[in-house]
Amino acid sequence: MKIRDGFVSNSSSTSFLIYGVELNEEMVKKAIGEVDDTFEALQELANLEGLEYHNMMGDYEWLGISYDNMDDNETKLQFKKRVEGKIRKALKDDTIKCDTYSESWRDG
């Protein structure tokens, strides 16, 4: 039998880098109103608009598109304008300002 005395982990990690907006309660209410399951409603909204919805264990919520999903022939400026247009439409607000968000975390 072998005995391992080094570090053993059963953990997982994840990270993302998106261009979008950090959601707040006012934005969510304007976009989806009062619903029983906000998480599911935001997921559905994101899918309908071709966006990604990221929820970090209920502490932070983002709506946007990962830089990995930028088209090959698209400039960074074109990508940002495309994302902003989709977010403004989804959230029903032409004044939304987008930014780049990155986050990572590890379980275990």
Image: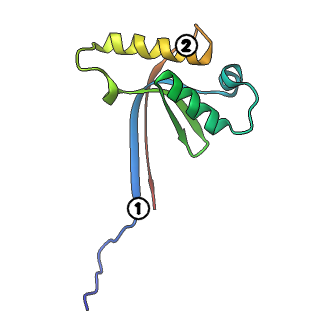
x 52%, y 18%: residue? 87
Closer-to-camera residue (11/65): 65
The x, y position of residue 53, in whole percent, is: 51, 33
Asked which secondary structure carries label 2, the reply is helix
- Name the kind of residue labelled 1 in the image: Ser
Q: Residue furthest front?
A: 48
x 51%, y 29%: residue? 47
Specify the color scheme: rainbow
**Location of residue 79 by image quarter:** top left
Check the image and report above or below for 66 versus 9: above
Asked which secondary structure carries label 1, the reply is loop
- Name the kind of residue labelled 2 in the image: Arg
Mark 2 lies on residue:
88
Quarter the N terminus occupies: bottom left
The x, y position of residue 101, in whole percent, is: 44, 29
Closer-to-camera residue (15/29): 29
x 55%, y 39%: residue? 55
Label 1 environment density (alpha carbons within 10 Å; few <14, some 14–19, many ≥20): few
x 74%, y 38%: residue? 36
Mark 1 lies on residue:
11
The x, y position of residue 40, in whole percent, is: 62, 38
Check the image and report above or below for 49 versus 39: above
